[in-house]
Image (spheres, helix red, strand yellow):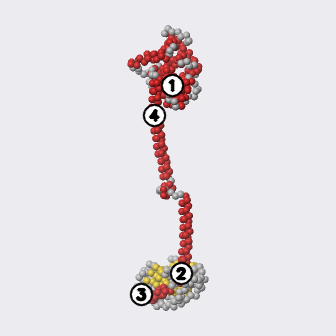
Protein backbone atom coordinates (compact mmCIF):
# COMPACT_ATOMS: atom_id res chain seq x y z
CA UNK A 1 0.00 0.00 0.00
CA UNK A 2 2.79 2.39 0.80
CA UNK A 3 4.21 1.75 -2.66
CA UNK A 4 1.05 2.99 -4.26
CA UNK A 5 1.17 6.24 -2.32
CA UNK A 6 4.80 6.87 -3.12
CA UNK A 7 4.30 5.99 -6.76
CA UNK A 8 1.44 8.44 -7.01
CA UNK A 9 3.52 11.11 -5.32
CA UNK A 10 6.25 10.60 -7.88
CA UNK A 11 3.66 10.78 -10.63
CA UNK A 12 2.41 14.08 -9.29
CA UNK A 13 6.01 15.30 -9.21
CA UNK A 14 6.32 14.65 -12.95
CA UNK A 15 7.45 11.03 -13.18
CA UNK A 16 5.17 9.68 -15.89
CA UNK A 17 6.45 6.14 -15.46
CA UNK A 18 5.20 6.07 -11.88
CA UNK A 19 1.71 5.68 -13.31
CA UNK A 20 2.83 2.45 -14.94
CA UNK A 21 3.73 1.13 -11.52
CA UNK A 22 0.29 2.02 -10.21
CA UNK A 23 -1.39 0.31 -13.13
CA UNK A 24 0.77 -2.76 -12.68
CA UNK A 25 0.05 -3.05 -8.94
CA UNK A 26 -3.65 -2.16 -8.80
CA UNK A 27 -5.07 -3.00 -12.22
CA UNK A 28 -6.30 -6.54 -11.58
CA UNK A 29 -7.81 -5.95 -8.17
CA UNK A 30 -9.61 -2.84 -9.39
CA UNK A 31 -10.94 -4.63 -12.43
CA UNK A 32 -12.33 -7.51 -10.41
CA UNK A 33 -13.79 -5.16 -7.86
CA UNK A 34 -15.53 -3.25 -10.62
CA UNK A 35 -16.52 -6.56 -12.10
CA UNK A 36 -18.41 -7.27 -8.90
CA UNK A 37 -20.26 -4.03 -9.42
CA UNK A 38 -21.07 -4.07 -13.12
CA UNK A 39 -21.01 -7.83 -13.70
CA UNK A 40 -19.09 -7.44 -16.95
CA UNK A 41 -15.36 -7.95 -17.16
CA UNK A 42 -14.96 -5.73 -20.25
CA UNK A 43 -16.85 -2.91 -18.65
CA UNK A 44 -14.92 -3.40 -15.48
CA UNK A 45 -11.70 -3.14 -17.46
CA UNK A 46 -12.94 0.01 -19.21
CA UNK A 47 -13.90 1.54 -15.92
CA UNK A 48 -10.52 0.66 -14.50
CA UNK A 49 -8.89 2.37 -17.49
CA UNK A 50 -11.11 5.40 -16.92
CA UNK A 51 -10.00 5.42 -13.30
CA UNK A 52 -6.34 5.60 -14.26
CA UNK A 53 -7.10 8.19 -16.95
CA UNK A 54 -8.71 10.31 -14.26
CA UNK A 55 -5.54 10.06 -12.20
CA UNK A 56 -3.50 11.00 -15.30
CA UNK A 57 -5.54 13.99 -16.38
CA UNK A 58 -7.12 15.44 -13.25
CA UNK A 59 -4.31 14.56 -10.84
CA UNK A 60 -6.53 14.46 -7.75
CA UNK A 61 -4.71 15.03 -4.52
CA UNK A 62 -4.34 12.12 -2.12
CA UNK A 63 -4.59 13.45 1.44
CA UNK A 64 -3.70 10.19 3.16
CA UNK A 65 -6.94 9.93 5.15
CA UNK A 66 -7.22 6.31 4.05
CA UNK A 67 -5.14 3.69 2.33
CA UNK A 68 -4.20 4.46 -1.26
CA UNK A 69 -5.90 1.26 -2.44
CA UNK A 70 -9.12 2.27 -0.67
CA UNK A 71 -8.93 5.75 -2.24
CA UNK A 72 -8.27 4.26 -5.67
CA UNK A 73 -11.12 1.75 -5.41
CA UNK A 74 -13.45 4.53 -4.29
CA UNK A 75 -12.58 6.52 -7.42
CA UNK A 76 -13.18 3.43 -9.56
CA UNK A 77 -16.49 2.74 -7.88
CA UNK A 78 -17.69 6.32 -8.44
CA UNK A 79 -16.71 6.18 -12.08
CA UNK A 80 -18.48 2.86 -12.51
CA UNK A 81 -21.64 4.10 -10.90
CA UNK A 82 -21.59 7.33 -12.91
CA UNK A 83 -21.13 5.41 -16.12
CA UNK A 84 -23.84 2.92 -15.28
CA UNK A 85 -26.16 5.79 -14.42
CA UNK A 86 -25.61 7.33 -17.83
CA UNK A 87 -25.74 4.14 -19.86
CA UNK A 88 -28.80 1.98 -20.37
CA UNK A 89 -29.40 -0.52 -17.62
CA UNK A 90 -29.59 -3.51 -19.89
CA UNK A 91 -27.44 -3.92 -22.93
CA UNK A 92 -27.70 -6.54 -25.56
CA UNK A 93 -24.65 -8.72 -25.82
CA UNK A 94 -23.92 -10.28 -29.21
CA UNK A 95 -23.51 -14.01 -29.37
CA UNK A 96 -19.97 -13.58 -30.53
CA UNK A 97 -19.14 -12.03 -27.20
CA UNK A 98 -20.55 -14.92 -25.22
CA UNK A 99 -17.09 -16.35 -24.72
CA UNK A 100 -16.32 -13.37 -22.53
CA UNK A 101 -17.96 -15.09 -19.62
CA UNK A 102 -15.66 -18.04 -19.84
CA UNK A 103 -12.81 -15.62 -20.38
CA UNK A 104 -13.75 -13.84 -17.19
CA UNK A 105 -13.76 -17.11 -15.37
CA UNK A 106 -10.33 -17.95 -16.65
CA UNK A 107 -9.10 -14.52 -15.66
CA UNK A 108 -10.46 -15.00 -12.17
CA UNK A 109 -8.70 -18.29 -12.02
CA UNK A 110 -5.44 -16.54 -12.86
CA UNK A 111 -6.02 -13.77 -10.36
CA UNK A 112 -7.36 -15.93 -7.53
CA UNK A 113 -4.80 -18.62 -7.09
CA UNK A 114 -6.48 -20.24 -4.12
CA UNK A 115 -8.95 -22.88 -5.25
CA UNK A 116 -11.24 -22.31 -2.35
CA UNK A 117 -11.30 -18.63 -3.07
CA UNK A 118 -12.02 -19.37 -6.66
CA UNK A 119 -15.04 -21.46 -5.75
CA UNK A 120 -16.04 -18.76 -3.36
CA UNK A 121 -15.70 -16.13 -6.09
CA UNK A 122 -17.94 -18.07 -8.40
CA UNK A 123 -20.59 -18.32 -5.72
CA UNK A 124 -20.23 -14.58 -4.92
CA UNK A 125 -20.70 -13.65 -8.55
CA UNK A 126 -24.18 -15.16 -8.43
CA UNK A 127 -25.25 -12.97 -5.52
CA UNK A 128 -26.66 -9.46 -5.59
CA UNK A 129 -24.09 -6.81 -6.60
CA UNK A 130 -24.13 -5.26 -3.15
CA UNK A 131 -23.46 -8.62 -1.47
CA UNK A 132 -20.90 -9.42 -4.08
CA UNK A 133 -19.05 -6.16 -3.44
CA UNK A 134 -18.84 -6.47 0.29
CA UNK A 135 -17.86 -10.13 0.17
CA UNK A 136 -15.20 -9.46 -2.49
CA UNK A 137 -13.74 -6.56 -0.60
CA UNK A 138 -13.63 -8.41 2.72
CA UNK A 139 -12.89 -11.99 1.77
CA UNK A 140 -11.02 -11.65 -1.53
CA UNK A 141 -9.19 -8.28 -1.28
CA UNK A 142 -8.76 -8.52 2.49
CA UNK A 143 -10.17 -5.07 3.45
CA UNK A 144 -11.55 -4.68 6.95
CA UNK A 145 -15.06 -3.47 7.58
CA UNK A 146 -14.17 0.22 7.86
CA UNK A 147 -12.17 0.24 4.64
CA UNK A 148 -14.94 -1.65 2.86
CA UNK A 149 -17.39 0.90 4.27
CA UNK A 150 -15.24 3.77 2.97
CA UNK A 151 -15.20 2.29 -0.49
CA UNK A 152 -18.90 1.51 -0.55
CA UNK A 153 -19.87 4.80 1.20
CA UNK A 154 -21.48 2.98 4.07
CA UNK A 155 -21.17 3.23 7.79
CA UNK A 156 -19.68 0.49 9.99
CA UNK A 157 -23.09 -0.77 11.14
CA UNK A 158 -24.37 -0.84 7.58
CA UNK A 159 -21.28 -2.76 6.54
CA UNK A 160 -21.78 -5.25 9.33
CA UNK A 161 -25.48 -5.78 8.50
CA UNK A 162 -24.72 -5.96 4.82
CA UNK A 163 -21.90 -8.40 5.42
CA UNK A 164 -24.15 -10.55 7.62
CA UNK A 165 -26.85 -10.78 4.97
CA UNK A 166 -24.26 -11.36 2.23
CA UNK A 167 -22.76 -14.25 4.18
CA UNK A 168 -26.19 -15.85 4.58
CA UNK A 169 -26.88 -15.53 0.88
CA UNK A 170 -23.46 -16.94 0.03
CA UNK A 171 -23.94 -19.85 2.42
CA UNK A 172 -27.20 -20.76 0.76
CA UNK A 173 -25.58 -20.52 -2.62
CA UNK A 174 -22.67 -22.72 -1.62
CA UNK A 175 -25.02 -25.27 -0.09
CA UNK A 176 -26.88 -25.41 -3.38
CA UNK A 177 -23.66 -26.38 -5.09
CA UNK A 178 -22.73 -28.88 -2.38
CA UNK A 179 -19.90 -26.88 -0.81
CA UNK A 180 -19.53 -25.96 2.79
CA UNK A 181 -17.22 -23.03 3.48
CA UNK A 182 -16.10 -23.26 7.05
CA UNK A 183 -15.19 -19.60 7.57
CA UNK A 184 -18.69 -18.40 6.85
CA UNK B 1 -7.77 -8.94 -20.29
CA UNK B 2 -5.07 -6.56 -21.40
CA UNK B 3 -1.70 -6.33 -19.77
CA UNK B 4 -0.72 -3.40 -17.65
CA UNK B 5 1.53 -2.00 -20.42
CA UNK B 6 -1.30 -1.95 -22.87
CA UNK B 7 -3.54 -0.33 -20.30
CA UNK B 8 -0.76 2.17 -19.49
CA UNK B 9 -0.43 3.06 -23.17
CA UNK B 10 -4.19 3.43 -23.50
CA UNK B 11 -4.28 5.61 -20.38
CA UNK B 12 -1.43 7.78 -21.61
CA UNK B 13 -2.86 8.11 -25.11
CA UNK B 14 -6.40 8.93 -24.05
CA UNK B 15 -5.11 11.12 -21.23
CA UNK B 16 -2.95 13.17 -23.66
CA UNK B 17 -5.89 13.51 -26.01
CA UNK B 18 -8.07 14.75 -23.19
CA UNK B 19 -5.38 17.19 -22.05
CA UNK B 20 -4.95 18.39 -25.62
CA UNK B 21 -8.66 19.02 -25.96
CA UNK B 22 -8.65 20.84 -22.65
CA UNK B 23 -5.76 23.03 -23.78
CA UNK B 24 -7.51 23.86 -27.03
CA UNK B 25 -10.71 24.59 -25.17
CA UNK B 26 -8.91 26.73 -22.59
CA UNK B 27 -7.10 28.62 -25.34
CA UNK B 28 -10.36 29.20 -27.20
CA UNK B 29 -12.10 30.40 -24.04
CA UNK B 30 -9.21 32.73 -23.26
CA UNK B 31 -9.23 34.15 -26.77
CA UNK B 32 -12.96 34.70 -26.76
CA UNK B 33 -12.88 36.27 -23.31
CA UNK B 34 -10.07 38.61 -24.37
CA UNK B 35 -11.99 39.62 -27.50
CA UNK B 36 -15.17 40.23 -25.54
CA UNK B 37 -13.25 42.19 -22.92
CA UNK B 38 -11.65 44.32 -25.62
CA UNK B 39 -14.98 45.01 -27.24
CA UNK B 40 -16.50 45.96 -23.90
CA UNK B 41 -13.57 48.25 -23.13
CA UNK B 42 -13.87 49.88 -26.56
CA UNK B 43 -17.59 50.39 -26.06
CA UNK B 44 -17.04 51.91 -22.62
CA UNK B 45 -14.29 54.23 -23.85
CA UNK B 46 -16.36 55.22 -26.86
CA UNK B 47 -19.34 56.00 -24.69
CA UNK B 48 -17.14 58.00 -22.32
CA UNK B 49 -15.68 60.01 -25.18
CA UNK B 50 -19.11 60.53 -26.69
CA UNK B 51 -20.49 61.91 -23.44
CA UNK B 52 -17.43 63.97 -22.55
CA UNK B 53 -17.30 67.26 -24.40
CA UNK B 54 -13.80 68.08 -23.20
CA UNK B 55 -12.33 64.97 -24.75
CA UNK B 56 -14.36 65.45 -27.93
CA UNK B 57 -12.44 68.67 -28.74
CA UNK B 58 -9.14 66.87 -28.75
CA UNK B 59 -8.39 66.60 -32.45
CA UNK B 60 -4.90 65.23 -32.46
CA UNK B 61 -1.56 65.08 -30.74
CA UNK B 62 -0.80 68.70 -31.62
CA UNK B 63 -3.73 69.96 -29.61
CA UNK B 64 -2.44 68.32 -26.45
CA UNK B 65 -0.35 70.80 -24.51
CA UNK B 66 1.70 70.13 -21.49
CA UNK B 67 0.94 72.23 -18.42
CA UNK B 68 4.14 74.29 -18.71
CA UNK B 69 3.17 75.50 -22.16
CA UNK B 70 -0.25 76.45 -20.96
CA UNK B 71 1.23 78.54 -18.18
CA UNK B 72 3.52 80.33 -20.58
CA UNK B 73 0.69 81.05 -22.96
CA UNK B 74 -1.41 82.52 -20.19
CA UNK B 75 1.39 84.80 -19.17
CA UNK B 76 1.77 85.94 -22.75
CA UNK B 77 -1.90 86.75 -23.00
CA UNK B 78 -1.71 88.77 -19.83
CA UNK B 79 1.19 90.77 -21.17
CA UNK B 80 -0.67 91.42 -24.36
CA UNK B 81 -3.69 92.63 -22.46
CA UNK B 82 -1.51 95.05 -20.56
CA UNK B 83 -0.08 96.32 -23.81
CA UNK B 84 -3.51 96.83 -25.21
CA UNK B 85 -4.55 98.77 -22.16
CA UNK B 86 -1.56 101.00 -22.49
CA UNK B 87 -2.24 101.62 -26.13
CA UNK B 88 -5.81 102.48 -25.42
CA UNK B 89 -4.74 104.98 -22.85
CA UNK B 90 -2.44 106.63 -25.29
CA UNK B 91 -5.14 106.86 -27.89
CA UNK B 92 -7.52 108.41 -25.44
CA UNK B 93 -5.05 111.03 -24.46
CA UNK B 94 -4.41 111.86 -28.04
CA UNK B 95 -8.08 112.32 -28.67
CA UNK B 96 -8.41 114.60 -25.72
CA UNK B 97 -5.52 116.63 -26.92
CA UNK B 98 -7.02 116.78 -30.33
CA UNK B 99 -10.31 117.99 -28.99
CA UNK B 100 -8.72 120.68 -26.90
CA UNK B 101 -6.62 121.94 -29.71
CA UNK B 102 -9.33 121.81 -32.32
CA UNK B 103 -9.59 125.58 -32.41
CA UNK B 104 -5.93 126.16 -32.93
CA UNK B 105 -5.43 124.09 -35.93
CA UNK B 106 -4.34 126.22 -38.78
CA UNK B 107 -5.01 129.61 -40.10
CA UNK B 108 -4.34 128.56 -43.63
CA UNK B 109 -7.28 126.24 -43.69
CA UNK B 110 -9.49 128.88 -42.28
CA UNK B 111 -8.40 131.33 -44.86
CA UNK B 112 -9.14 128.89 -47.61
CA UNK B 113 -12.55 128.22 -46.23
CA UNK B 114 -13.25 131.89 -46.04
CA UNK B 115 -12.28 132.38 -49.64
CA UNK B 116 -14.68 129.63 -50.61
CA UNK B 117 -17.44 131.24 -48.70
CA UNK B 118 -16.78 134.60 -50.26
CA UNK B 119 -17.21 133.20 -53.67
CA UNK B 120 -20.21 131.05 -53.02
CA UNK B 121 -22.49 132.89 -50.66
CA UNK B 122 -25.02 135.45 -51.65
CA UNK B 123 -24.68 137.81 -48.73
CA UNK B 124 -21.62 139.81 -48.22
CA UNK B 125 -19.60 138.66 -45.37
CA UNK B 126 -17.14 140.74 -43.53
CA UNK B 127 -14.26 139.13 -41.89
CA UNK B 128 -11.98 140.48 -39.34
CA UNK B 129 -8.28 140.10 -39.80
CA UNK B 130 -7.22 136.67 -38.99
CA UNK B 131 -4.75 136.42 -36.27
CA UNK B 132 -1.85 134.14 -36.45
CA UNK B 133 -2.50 130.75 -35.09
CA UNK B 134 -0.45 130.06 -32.06
CA UNK B 135 0.05 126.52 -30.93
CA UNK B 136 -1.29 127.20 -27.51
CA UNK B 137 -4.54 126.25 -25.94
CA UNK B 138 -7.24 128.80 -26.63
CA UNK B 139 -10.92 128.96 -26.12
CA UNK B 140 -13.75 128.54 -28.52
CA UNK B 141 -14.01 132.24 -29.06
CA UNK B 142 -13.26 131.89 -32.66
CA UNK B 143 -14.54 132.94 -35.99
CA UNK B 144 -16.48 130.00 -37.23
CA UNK B 145 -17.02 129.68 -40.85
CA UNK B 146 -19.43 127.21 -42.17
CA UNK B 147 -19.67 126.23 -45.76
CA UNK B 148 -22.11 123.97 -47.35
CA UNK B 149 -22.02 122.51 -50.73
CA UNK B 150 -25.54 122.29 -51.97
CA UNK B 151 -24.91 119.67 -54.52
CA UNK B 152 -22.87 117.53 -52.23
CA UNK B 153 -25.36 118.07 -49.46
CA UNK B 154 -22.64 118.55 -46.90
CA UNK B 155 -22.08 121.10 -44.26
CA UNK B 156 -18.63 122.21 -43.30
CA UNK B 157 -17.65 124.28 -40.36
CA UNK B 158 -14.27 125.82 -40.25
CA UNK B 159 -12.96 127.72 -37.33
CA UNK B 160 -10.24 130.20 -36.98
CA UNK B 161 -9.08 132.04 -33.94
CA UNK B 162 -10.43 135.47 -33.34
CA UNK B 163 -10.58 138.04 -30.66
CA UNK B 164 -11.42 136.45 -27.41
CA UNK B 165 -12.31 137.72 -24.07
CA UNK B 166 -12.62 134.41 -22.40
CA UNK B 167 -10.23 133.14 -19.84
CA UNK B 168 -8.99 129.64 -20.00
CA UNK B 169 -7.29 128.00 -17.08
CA UNK B 170 -5.19 126.13 -19.57
CA UNK B 171 -4.29 129.24 -21.56
CA UNK B 172 -0.71 129.62 -22.60
CA UNK B 173 0.00 126.00 -22.12
CA UNK B 174 1.92 124.47 -24.90
CA UNK B 175 0.20 121.61 -26.51
CA UNK B 176 1.83 118.89 -28.43
CA UNK B 177 1.03 118.93 -32.11
CA UNK B 178 -1.93 116.81 -32.89
CA UNK B 179 -3.56 115.91 -36.12
CA UNK B 180 -7.15 116.96 -36.27
CA UNK B 181 -9.75 116.78 -38.94
CA UNK B 182 -11.88 119.68 -40.13
CA UNK B 183 -15.24 120.07 -38.54
CA UNK B 184 -17.32 118.64 -41.26
CA UNK B 185 -21.00 118.12 -40.81
CA UNK B 186 -22.42 115.73 -43.20
CA UNK B 187 -26.10 115.20 -43.44
CA UNK B 188 -28.67 113.93 -45.86
CA UNK B 189 -30.64 117.06 -46.43
CA UNK B 190 -32.84 117.74 -49.40
CA UNK B 191 -31.66 120.53 -51.59
CA UNK B 192 -33.86 123.59 -51.48
CA UNK B 193 -31.95 126.71 -50.82
CA UNK B 194 -28.77 128.16 -49.55
CA UNK B 195 -28.61 129.98 -46.31
CA UNK B 196 -25.79 132.18 -45.31
CA UNK B 197 -25.33 133.52 -41.90
CA UNK B 198 -22.80 135.66 -40.19
CA UNK B 199 -22.45 135.34 -36.50
CA UNK B 200 -19.96 136.10 -33.88
CA UNK B 201 -19.68 133.94 -30.87
CA UNK B 202 -17.77 134.32 -27.73
CA UNK B 203 -17.97 131.45 -25.41
CA UNK B 204 -16.68 130.98 -21.95
CA UNK B 205 -15.43 127.52 -21.55
CA UNK B 206 -15.59 126.02 -18.19
CA UNK B 207 -12.66 123.94 -17.06
CA UNK B 208 -14.79 120.86 -17.43
CA UNK B 209 -15.69 121.73 -21.03
CA UNK B 210 -19.29 121.98 -20.05
CA UNK B 211 -22.02 124.17 -21.52
CA UNK B 212 -21.01 127.71 -22.39
CA UNK B 213 -22.99 130.84 -22.46
CA UNK B 214 -22.83 132.52 -25.79
CA UNK B 215 -23.10 136.16 -26.60
CA UNK B 216 -22.83 138.21 -29.67
CA UNK B 217 -19.54 139.87 -30.53
CA UNK B 218 -17.91 141.31 -33.50
CA UNK B 219 -16.79 137.96 -34.72
CA UNK B 220 -18.62 136.40 -37.58
CA UNK B 221 -20.10 133.01 -38.18
CA UNK B 222 -21.36 131.82 -41.45
CA UNK B 223 -23.70 128.96 -41.61
CA UNK B 224 -24.58 127.66 -44.98
CA UNK B 225 -27.04 124.90 -44.84
CA UNK B 226 -30.01 123.57 -46.57
CA UNK B 227 -33.46 123.90 -45.16
CA UNK B 228 -36.10 121.62 -46.50
CA UNK B 229 -39.53 122.76 -47.49
CA UNK B 230 -40.96 120.07 -45.36
CA UNK B 231 -39.79 118.28 -42.34
CA UNK B 232 -36.84 119.32 -40.34
CA UNK B 233 -33.13 119.56 -40.58
CA UNK B 234 -30.28 119.78 -38.25
CA UNK B 235 -27.95 122.67 -38.50
CA UNK B 236 -25.26 124.05 -36.33
CA UNK B 237 -26.24 127.27 -34.70
CA UNK B 238 -24.67 129.26 -32.00
CA UNK B 239 -27.17 131.63 -30.54
CA UNK B 240 -30.44 133.30 -31.19
CA UNK B 241 -29.00 136.24 -33.04
CA UNK B 242 -27.24 133.95 -35.38
CA UNK B 243 -30.42 132.08 -35.97
CA UNK B 244 -32.26 135.29 -36.47
CA UNK B 245 -29.93 136.51 -39.08
CA UNK B 246 -29.56 133.09 -40.43
CA UNK B 247 -33.18 132.79 -41.24
CA UNK B 248 -33.74 136.38 -42.21
CA UNK B 249 -34.12 135.41 -45.81
CA UNK B 250 -34.80 132.01 -47.15
CA UNK B 251 -35.69 131.21 -50.68
CA UNK B 252 -38.10 128.45 -51.35
CA UNK B 253 -38.77 127.63 -54.93
CA UNK B 254 -37.91 131.02 -56.40
CA UNK B 255 -39.73 132.82 -53.62
CA UNK B 256 -37.89 134.56 -50.84
CA UNK B 257 -39.28 134.67 -47.37
CA UNK B 258 -38.13 137.21 -44.87
CA UNK B 259 -38.46 136.08 -41.33
CA UNK B 260 -38.56 137.91 -38.06
CA UNK B 261 -38.33 136.74 -34.51
CA UNK B 262 -41.19 134.81 -33.31
CA UNK B 263 -43.53 136.37 -30.87
CA UNK B 264 -43.63 133.13 -28.95
CA UNK B 265 -39.96 133.13 -28.27
CA UNK B 266 -39.40 133.67 -24.64
CA UNK B 267 -36.84 136.32 -23.89
CA UNK B 268 -35.78 134.55 -20.76
CA UNK B 269 -34.73 131.47 -22.64
CA UNK B 270 -30.99 131.19 -22.37
CA UNK B 271 -29.29 129.09 -24.89
CA UNK B 272 -26.04 127.27 -24.49
CA UNK B 273 -23.82 125.98 -27.10
CA UNK B 274 -21.80 122.94 -26.25
CA UNK B 275 -18.25 122.78 -27.12
CA UNK B 276 -18.62 120.48 -30.06
CA UNK B 277 -21.11 122.82 -31.80
CA UNK B 278 -23.49 120.00 -32.44
CA UNK B 279 -25.95 120.32 -29.64
CA UNK B 280 -28.00 123.19 -28.45
CA UNK B 281 -29.00 123.40 -24.87
CA UNK B 282 -31.62 125.74 -23.51
CA UNK B 283 -32.78 126.53 -20.03
CA UNK B 284 -36.15 128.05 -19.40
CA UNK B 285 -35.27 130.30 -16.52
CA UNK B 286 -38.88 130.84 -15.67
CA UNK B 287 -39.70 127.20 -15.11
CA UNK B 288 -36.14 126.01 -14.60
CA UNK B 289 -36.57 123.34 -17.25
CA UNK B 290 -33.48 122.44 -19.18
CA UNK B 291 -33.66 121.20 -22.72
CA UNK B 292 -31.00 119.46 -24.64
CA UNK B 293 -31.34 118.57 -28.26
CA UNK B 294 -29.83 119.06 -31.55
CA UNK B 295 -30.90 122.36 -32.94
CA UNK B 296 -33.72 120.93 -34.88
CA UNK B 297 -35.27 123.61 -36.97
CA UNK B 298 -38.20 122.53 -38.97
CA UNK B 299 -40.48 124.19 -41.40
CA UNK B 300 -44.24 124.00 -41.55
CA UNK B 301 -46.14 122.41 -44.33
CA UNK B 302 -45.51 123.43 -47.88
CA UNK B 303 -47.00 126.78 -48.71
CA UNK B 304 -47.18 127.85 -45.11
CA UNK B 305 -43.64 128.84 -44.57
CA UNK B 306 -44.44 131.68 -42.31
CA UNK B 307 -42.92 130.13 -39.22
CA UNK B 308 -39.68 128.47 -38.28
CA UNK B 309 -39.86 126.33 -35.22
CA UNK B 310 -37.22 125.19 -32.85
CA UNK B 311 -37.96 121.85 -31.33
CA UNK B 312 -36.32 120.25 -28.34
CA UNK B 313 -36.46 116.56 -27.75
CA UNK B 314 -39.43 116.33 -30.07
CA UNK B 315 -41.57 117.76 -27.33
CA UNK B 316 -40.88 121.37 -26.57
CA UNK B 317 -41.35 123.71 -29.46
CA UNK B 318 -40.48 127.34 -29.79
CA UNK B 319 -41.53 129.47 -32.70
CA UNK B 320 -38.38 131.32 -33.46
CA UNK B 321 -39.27 133.21 -36.55
CA UNK B 322 -42.24 134.40 -38.45
CA UNK B 323 -42.53 135.90 -41.84
CA UNK B 324 -42.16 139.62 -41.86
CA UNK B 325 -45.11 141.75 -42.74
Instruction: Specify whether disc 3 shares its chain with disc 2.
Output: yes
Residue B20: mark in rendering: 4
Q: Give the number of the mark in front: 4 or 1.
A: 1
Question: Label 2 is found on which chain of the structure?
Answer: B
> x, y percentage for residue A131?
52, 17
Separation (CA) of disc 4 from disc 1: 24 Å
Secondary structure beneath disc 4?
Answer: helix
Q: Are marks 1 and 2 on the same chain?
A: no
Mark on residue B255?
3
Asked whether disc 4 touches disc 2, contact meaning CB atoms under 8 Å apart, the reply is: no
| Mark 3 or mark 2: whose residue is earlier in sequence | 2
Q: Subunit of mark 3? A: B
- Pointer 2 residue: B177
CB atoms at circles 3 and 1 under 8 Å apart? no
- SS label for mark 3: strand
Q: How many marks?
A: 4
- Image height of B241 relative to B77, above or below: below
Looking at the image, which residue sits at the far top?
A178
Marks 3,2: beta carbons within 8 A = no
- Tell which tag, 3 or 2, sits nearer the viewer: 2
Q: Residue at x 50, y 15 (%)?
A: A113
Screen quadrant of the N terminus of chain B: top left
Element type at mark 2: loop
> Foreground residue, B152 or B247?
B152
Neighbor class of circle 4 (other Cα within 10 Å; few <14, some 14-19, many 20+) is few
Alpha carbon distance from label 3 to label 2? 48 Å
Amino acid sequence: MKNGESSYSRFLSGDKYALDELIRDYKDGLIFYLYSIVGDIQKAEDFAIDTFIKLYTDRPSFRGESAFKTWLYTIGRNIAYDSMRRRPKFTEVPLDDAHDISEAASLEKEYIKDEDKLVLRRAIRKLKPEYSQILYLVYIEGFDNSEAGDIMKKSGKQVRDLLYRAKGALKKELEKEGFVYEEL
Amino acid sequence: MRSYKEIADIVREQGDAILGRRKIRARRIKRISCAVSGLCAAVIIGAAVWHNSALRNVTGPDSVKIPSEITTETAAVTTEAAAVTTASTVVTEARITSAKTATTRTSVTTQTAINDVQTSTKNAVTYQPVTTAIPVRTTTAAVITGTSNVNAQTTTLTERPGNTSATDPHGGEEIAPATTEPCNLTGTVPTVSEITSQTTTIAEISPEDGPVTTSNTGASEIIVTTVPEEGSTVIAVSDEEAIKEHFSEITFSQRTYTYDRSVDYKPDLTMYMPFDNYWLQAVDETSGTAYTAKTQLYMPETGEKDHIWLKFDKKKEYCLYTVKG
